[in-house]
Amino acid sequence: MGNTVSCCVSPESSPKLPSRLPAERLEEFQTSTEVSDDTVPYLQHISDREVPDELALESNPSDHARASTIFLSKSQTDGDSCSTIFIDDSTVSQPNLKSTIKCVTLAIYYHIKNRDSDRSLDIFDEKLHPLSREPVPDDYAYVDPEHKLIYRFVRTLFSAAQLTAECAIVTLVYLERLLTYAELDICPANWKRIVLGAILLASKVWDDQAVWNVDYCQILKDITVEDMNEMERHFLELLQFNINVPASVYAKYYFDLRQLADDNNLSFPLEPLNNQRAQKLEAISRLCEDKYKDLSRAAMRRSLSADNLIGIRRSNAVLS
């Protein structure tokens, strides 16, 4: 074989020039394809030839700051959006929290109203996993909830658990991430449990004093701790355990919520995240992400030794 060089293309072959190439790019192209002194033909690396794939970047707003939020685009499909707003003139001790919850629940309202279909999972179905002893209406899966109903549901949870306005924004981030990752739709049949799951995770990631799953049983009374744990596990798995919230993503959701408020004549006095709180959000969310992954691996190991169990005992956590 001697010093003969073998290659996947013949030495006489050369790349074809594109039919329309600007002069400066043409000179660049010719320089890059010149044969080197050792007569080995230049082969452009595949990473230099392929165009970067931007589809994932543009389609996932909960991960990337450059992607557009889903709720804002859905809210702009209505010609007269102001008529759907629930306005409450009562005074509260935390006006910023109240305004933020109004905007976040309005985003959820538009998600439900302008959904593409009704893709869902049994774990989020309110008929299969009711949150109270009150019978679920037969048409529960067909009637869209009003903004007032969504607001009061979220407001009750935030007030009882003493959650913050920032936690409401993180809740919306997790909700849209779930819809994107799992290819689900938030609809009349599942909106309560999806929102509850997002609030559950957001409260553990953002707030200094995390709310335990059993604490939500005191708020919703008839839900069991086992159900809460199972829903949280499914939520995390559907998120692929990605609960990291970069400061840039938080800022994007914050400003898009401000835009939503302006479009619907709502006040939004919450201040944006400062550098210190932004760093705290990223650090805590990454720490929680690692913790959840470790717990998941431990749970999988424990499950291997539980193959012979016939059933699991469940105890109702009904508190007055």
Image (cartoon, rainbow, N blue to C red):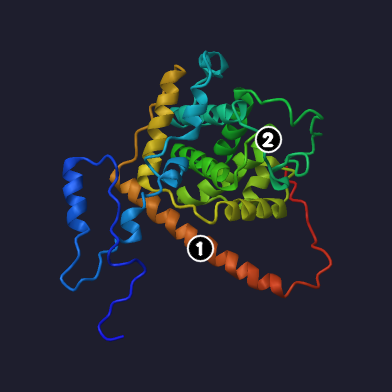
Give percent across and percent down for residue 249. 39, 42
Q: Residue at x 52, y 44 (%)?
A: 177
In this view, the mark in front (2 or 1): 2
Residue at x-position 53% and y-position 63%:
293
Q: Amino acid at mark 1?
A: Lys
218 or 295: nearer the viewer:
295
Within 10 angstroms of label 2, few (less than 14), some, or many (20 or more) residues? Answer: some
Q: In which quadrant of the rendered image does the C terminus lie?
A: top right
Q: Measuring 38% from the left and 48% from the top, which residue is drawn there?
A: 246
Q: Amino acid at mark 2?
A: Asp
Sequence-first disc among 2 and 1: 2
The spot of residue 74 in percent (x, y) is 52, 27
Give the residue drawn at x 40%, y 45%. Answer: 54
Mark 2 lies on residue = 118
Image height of 225 relative to 66, above or below: below
Q: CA distance from mark 2 to mark 1?
A: 32 Å
The N terminus sits in image quarter: bottom left
> Dot 1 lies on which element?
helix
Residue 275 image position (x, y, % from top left): 29, 45
Q: Which residue is mark 1?
A: 291
